[in-house]
Amino acid sequence: MLIRSLLLLLGLAVTAALPALQPVTFRQPDKTEVTLGADVRRVYVTADRAGDKLMASTMEGHSQAVLDAQQAVVIADISGAPFFVKRIIRSSLRDREYTTWMDLDGVIQPQIPHQQDTVTVIDLERGAVAAVRHVDTVEALRAELGITAAP
């Protein structure tokens, strides 16, 4: 357990003894409910403003097709935000060229540790967590997303 925690702190992939993600329902900015299913192979999680800005700036000029090619989704954990701030966040997410699911209740965070100011990248194999990485630069996130050049 200590070794796994240290690896997570260093941002290295952790592949041993990680749990399957529990079935969870999220909301899209238009209030449509969506469930994380077995068809999803990668999840990008943002848990704070810096992580969200990193994801948004990396995806700027790119569409949902980038995520669809990886069978990936973006989840923003906005559970800690006050109600009125959640409304502002929801509005800003609607304007993006890609879909972001909202975690309103903080259900993803207990399952997968996050690091502040990063995007957490979770690789899934049949719903089970295969690897977790914490990305903190646009260049590294572009590589994760398979984006080879700015738009």
Image (tube, helix red, strand yellow):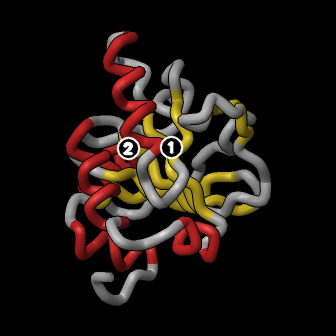
Determine whether 113 is above or below 6 in the image. Answer: above
Sequence-first disc among 2 and 1: 2
Quarter where residue 41 is shown: bottom right
Q: Position of residue 134 (x, y in %)?
A: 33, 56
Kindly identify the residue that appears in the image at 24 percent across and 38 percent down: 49
Which residue is the extreme one toward the bottom? 148
- Where in the figure is residue 43, as x and y percent of width and height? 54, 54
Residue 68 vs 95, above or below: the answer is below
Q: Quadrant of the N terminus?
A: top left
Identify the residue position indicated by label 1 in the image: 75
Label 2 sits on residue? 46
Nearer-the-camera pick, 110 or 98: 98
- The residue under the point 63% across, 29% down is 31
**Is residue 7 or residue 108 the one in the foreground?**
108
Q: Nearer the viewer, residue 135 or 103?
A: 103
Q: Quadrant of residue 140?
A: bottom left
| Pointers 2 and 1 in contact (C-beta within 8 Å) | yes
Taking the spot 64% from the left edge, 59% from the top edge, the residue there is: 124
